[in-house]
């Protein structure tokens, strides 16, 4: 299975308790729903389930969960299409969407990214590992709570709430991963972010991506924002120069 996570920067408060966190599990295999549901509910999370994409969209709109664990290959409507529909619902803009699927082909990964997700892991995944991943993702959201929604650095403005950036008042549209990478680096100008930290916060620490994924995204940002704004620290990582 594949875990794809789409992060948005308006998040729930740091005082939110586990019992207040809703998780929607979507899979056409009853065993998966039972095992994953049991392990997450034992941690105190509110769990609901759906067996196909159509039911998932309906429940997501009604329950507004903080996290959706969504299988890809399902009858009636697959997870990719369901994700696309969920991403069009404004009330669900803060929801983390996690794909859980046995498919590991490039098509599945890229289709998931294009549908509005960000990270993935493939199964088999041990229940305890999945629980740890969920906890890590929720901690990451809490860590971002104190970050200002609008960052202004010189001529660059990053609106984390509206997912927009502008340079000298000219709006520039960035793909999701480029936006999140820029947003991360710009939160602490001149700080060197290690590659491992970037992968963890932007792609997820269990995501399987090519070794040059960060380099490719940095290169694209340099083309759009300016080469001098990004400095490579060889063997370590990158920093945003103010």
Image (cartoon, grey):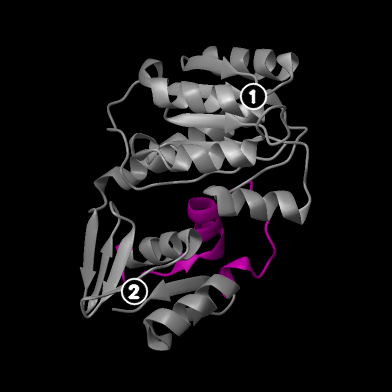
| Residue 197 on the magenta span | yes
Residue 73 in picture, x, y percent from top left: 73, 34
Image quarter where the N terminus lies is top right
Residue 42 in picture, x, y percent from top left: 54, 12
Q: Which mark is residue 190?
A: 2
Crowding around mark 2 (Cα neighbors within 10 Å: few <14, some 14 to 19, many 20+) is some
Marked residue nearer the N-terminal end (2 or 1): 1
- The structure residue drawn at horizontal position 58% and vertical position 74%, both measured from the top left corner, is 215
User: Mark 1 sits on what residue?
Assistant: 52
Would you say 4 lies left or right of 91 here? right
Residue segment shown in magenta:
187-215
SS for callout 2 = loop
235 in relation to 51, above or below: below
28 in relation to 196, above or below: above
140 in relation to 17, above or below: below
- The structure residue drawn at horizontal position 63% and vertical position 36%, both measured from the top left corner, is 79
Q: Is residue 231 visible?
A: no
User: Which callout, 2 or 1, points to the residue nearer the camera?
Assistant: 1
SS for callout 1 = loop
Image quarter where the C terminus lies is bottom left
**What's the CA distance linking mark 2 and mark 1?**
46 Å
């Amino acid at each position: 299975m594949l875990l794809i996570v789409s992060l948005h920067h308006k998040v729930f408060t740091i005082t939110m308790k586990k019992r207040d966190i809703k998780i929607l599990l979507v899979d056409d295999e009853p065993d998966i729903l039972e095992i994953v549901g049991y392990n997450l509910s034992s941690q105190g999370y509110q769990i609901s389930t759906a067996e196909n994409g159509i039911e998932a969209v309906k429940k997501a709109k009604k329950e507004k969960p903080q996290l959706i664990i969504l299988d890809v290959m399902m009858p009636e409507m697959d997870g990719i299409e369901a994700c696309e529909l969920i991403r069009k619902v404004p009330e669900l803009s803060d929801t983390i969407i996690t794909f859980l699927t046995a498919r590991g082909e490039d098509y599945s990964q890229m289709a998931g990214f294009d549908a509005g997700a960000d990270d993935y892991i493939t199964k088999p995944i041990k229940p305890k590992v999945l629980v740890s991943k969920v906890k890590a993702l929720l901690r990451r959201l809490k860590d971002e709570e104190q970050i200002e929604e609008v960052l202004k650095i010189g001529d660059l403005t990053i609106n984390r709430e509206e997912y927009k950036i502008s340079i000298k008042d000219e709006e520039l549209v960035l793909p999701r991963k480029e936006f999140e990478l820029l947003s991360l680096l710009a939160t602490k100008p001149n700080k060197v972010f290690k590659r491992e930290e970037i992968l963890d916060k932007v792609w997820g620490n269990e995501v399987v991506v090519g070794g040059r994924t960060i380099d490719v995204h940095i290169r694209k940002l340099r083309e759009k924002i300016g080469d001098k704004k990004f400095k490579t620290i060889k063997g370590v990582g990158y920093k945003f120069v103010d």
